[in-house]
Image (cartoon, coloured by chain):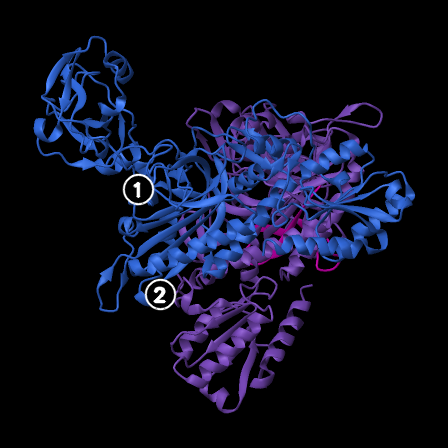
Chain colours: A blue, B purple
Amino acid sequence: MKVSAMLGQRFKQAPSDCVIESHALMTRGGYIKYMANGIYSLYMPGKRIMRKIENIIREEMDAIGGQEVLFPVVMPAALWEQSGRYYSIGSEMARWTDRGGNPMVLGMTHEEAAVHLAKDTAISYADYPFMIYQIQTKFRDEPRARGGLIRVREFTMKDAYSFHTSQEDLEAFYRRCFDAYNRIFRRAGCKNYMDFKSDSGIFGGNLSHEFMLLTEIGEDTLAVCPECGYRANMEAAEYIAQNAPGQAAPLEKIHTPDCSTIEALANFLGTDTKSFGKAVVYQREDNDGYIVVFIRGDLDVNETKLRNLVGCELRPAVITEECGIVAGFIGPVGLTPNAQVVVDRSLEGIEAMVCGANQVDYHYKNINLARDVGLVTYHDVAKICEGAVCPGCGRPIITIKKGIEIGNIFQLGTKYTEGLNMTYTDKDGTVKHPIMGCYGIGVGRLCASICQESHDDYGPIWPISIAPWQIEICNLRADDEQVNKTAAELYEQLQAAGAEVLYDDRDIRPGAMFADADLFGIPIRVVVSPKTCERGVIELSTRDKSYREDIPAADGLSAVLALRNRLMAEYK
Amino acid sequence: MKVSAMLGQRFKQAPSDCVIESHALMTRGGYIKYMANGIYSLYMPGKRIMRKIENIIREEMDAIGGQEVLFPVVMPAALWEQSGRYYSIGSEMARWTDRGGNPMVLGMTHEEAAVHLAKDTAISYADYPFMIYQIQTKFRDEPRARGGLIRVREFTMKDAYSFHTSQEDLEAFYRRCFDAYNRIFRRAGCKNYMDFKSDSGIFGGNLSHEFMLLTEIGEDTLAVCPECGYRANMEAAEYIAQNAPGQAAPLEKIHTPDCSTIEALANFLGTDTKSFGKAVVYQREDNDGYIVVFIRGDLDVNETKLRNLVGCELRPAVITEECGIVAGFIGPVGLTPNAQVVVDRSLEGIEAMVCGANQVDYHYKNINLARDVGLVTYHDVAKICEGAVCPGCGRPIITIKKGIEIGNIFQLGTKYTEGLNMTYTDKDGTVKHPIMGCYGIGVGRLCASICQESHDDYGPIWPISIAPWQIEICNLRADDEQVNKTAAELYEQLQAAGAEVLYDDRDIRPGAMFADADLFGIPIRVVVSPKTCERGVIELSTRDKSYREDIPAADGLSAVLALRNRLMAEYK
């Protein structure tokens, strides 16, 4: 491809709305074009990167027996009613009505479609297991689109669905897919990524893993042990409390005027919040009932763990006079029974703590839950934090990191096959619902994440496995016959040898050409100029600046190809 | 791929709603699965065919300098308001409102998006020409979805858009794209297809061509000269009238009771309808005004040509008392002036014709338009018919055929670049709108059309260039060790040699396996059975039954590969 013929412009100044480097560089480099909130078009270099990532994914999915299929973008709402998700998913699902008056949806994921495709076909145990996947456009009416392709509304996704007749078989395949994901990310050039056991959110089901690229711009918060390898999404990480039990003492009601916050109380009493029992109140989404969580004063509630515990969505409570909850002074002793009480494990074993007295401006001192409340069941609903005890090795060395989710795998169980009534006949003649797994990778997000991980101030540094082209030739003097001849010949030879070459043949200043080359981010660069021609060489270098050498022009072709092969071998 | 591991079933009975062979065979063969009206999922074999067609298209688009890009499926309505199509397109465009209250549309074509991508980038004449294309999902809320993938609502389309600074440059590129389309269709295995100059419909603009696969199930009607090569879509075909002028005679009003139809009048007068002037009345969509067309009694009005002539959409007229039109007895002499009159060329030169007298139960005889009406301008608005005079060679040998549109190319002019205000600065410093062309191929329709053209009673006969696999091995006795060994070895060897092989390894009856093989439609078949093993051979044949031979098993690999290479060479 000649740059002179290619649509797209590159520019110096990052648009003011780009707060993330990869977003700025992919906009400045002519990869993406904003059309509407979370909706982008791709220029040729962007599309080429996407296709290369897609092909890596395709190869690895095929290698574990995946069958590529295609589901529709537009689906009848009726299909989503069968699984119940038409109702359980909110405004992130795009809904409309067709000319015949039928309610339709845009696919944000395709569990229902996968079951629809398979259900009348895989009817005997002998038809199992199988995995089907597609690489297709999805739409999710995301309230917080941001960061270019990092979080969009319309996106290209690889989504795979496997079907099994036993949990063991699902687990065996799940493990193979886990390994395939590692190969995909490695081949695509991801460096600093990790898998995390995760909360499976709206997908329901059992075990799941997220693959996270660790980066400061990530939206997910992760707990990682630097020693033993333990790691978990903060949403799912267990919190292990190490409490100083203190000394039991008689219960005492104290006057604590204006101490309705934990900080005010700590100030007033001159003590550490670790000896406090803090109350946090939620309301259930299903029946508006109150949930009061008691947790150690220095900790926060992990709402995901709490949600999983109580089994429904929650919202911060609106505390009215009627509910009998005394905001700011809530405590376990004498609490109105109109609320479900959850006590976090961080309060277990504390002999004497400070808690609200359920009366304005009063707290209790020396509360001992066993003595003053009775039998208490403790649950783990605390949020893990920097320096927390590692659930893996027990040392207080947990570090908190940020990550972008670049892939996820789920054990779905029979939620969808039951909902859509997909069955098969087992060996013994009984009729059963198959067990499913699902496996997703967002192609555009992966592309943007790699750009985020692999760039310098001047542009992306694309891994050769996904670079839009492998080699760029910079012709520094388009008006010089010898330079033109040398550059054009090498371009032709490299193309004939099957290499992917971008040829910058424009008559522009070298500075502008190099600035563009940095934005193209192509791993191998060849510079041809009057100076190199004079010396009978070409200048060969890599975008990551790890290599730069003058090569006799006569050896140019073989040297460039050898360098390409060496770089490509790293991503095999 | 092993058939035993593949999702999908094949069955004997065509579903009752399949009236078109390709629809029945692609359903029976496990290629497509109906989800909703005009919405299908694809099983693995269907998806593989689609990808192969896409890759052929991609290669040919790249070869003429095309740059692959990607536009969004979901677009803001605001973009379509700029071109005016948000208003001019009716209910075939899917519309909805996002969570932020913004009206959105699903792309049914991407002219607006192409201009949006290019407009701030291609700002100098030196940036031209260029062509961008995508292969992407589209949605058109088609009222008449039919025939499986022949006419759907959701479809995969290659759409390309070229931008030029002169009409000459557009025409030169248009010709290159025309040639590329011929290569695409030939390589994909289309046999009986033709290009047709066509009416450009809602796309506006200038010259356009449709590529039509000729088939009885086609929806388009085509006029073809078997001698001189003239061909046109009936919508655009010129009709050349050869009239017997007759003998001028005095105008005469005759009583024609109950003769309000042309047939009744012909019966009553005992004459041929060729001497009648028939009136057909329409109403304009824009202002409800009437249009009365006079045309020779044996001919029909070509509404496309009429629409183009009067410059707006038309509908059959509702004739009320007030409008002064006397239905059934309309004629050019004494006609109320409240209507626009269009006279077809088929009435030119007739010295004496019969026409309505604008009075119930009365006609005129011997009307001579020049004498009785005055100066008449004649227009070509008649529909061409079987045996009509060929506009190419003048012989009355036109044949009427049916076709499926498998591709189209349009010269769009500046409609979209003006609407979206895309400009560039020309050499002389003036600011201009670039000129566009657009070029579409529906991938699924092409697939279904090829199946329609290339099948027998038992299944598709896929051209090897797009077949889901090149070779199928049928293992007729999965419980026979020698058969298994021979078949499995050949399968491994062929795969290692880079061939695409489907291996039917199921333990089923030979009849069922052959029925499935016919539905898979794979061009090369290898049969391994106890009988072939006994004789030390494999049975090699082609799906189209043109070849069948026993090959020594030891030569199997090379014979199969040689046959594959020979077949593939036909589609180079």
The residue sitting at 53% across, 39% down in the picture is: A449
Looking at the image, residue B502 sits to the left or right of residue A527; the answer is left
**Amino acid on which disc 1 is placed:** Glu
Which numbered marker is on residue A81?
A: 1
Residue A69 shows in the view: no
Residue A274 forms part of the magenta stretch: no
Alpha carbons under labels 2 and 1: distance apart:
27 Å
Report the residue at 15% width, 19% height from top.
A365
- Tell me the subunit letter for badge 2: A
Q: Where's residue A554, x and y in %?
A: 85, 55
Are there few (<14), some (14-19), or many (20+) residues within 10 Å of tag 2? Answer: some
Q: Which residue is mark 2?
A: A127
Q: Residue at x 61, y 83 (%)?
A: B555
Q: Residue A546 vs residue B280: left or right?
A: right
B236 or A364, which is in the foreground? A364
Image depth: mark 2 or mark 1 in front = 2
- The residue range painted magenta reads B206-232
- Rendered view: A426 above or below A157: below
In the rendering, at what x and y percent does residue B352 appear? Answer: 69, 40
- How many neighbours does mark 1 have within 10 angstroms: few (below 14), some (14-19), or many (20 or more)? some
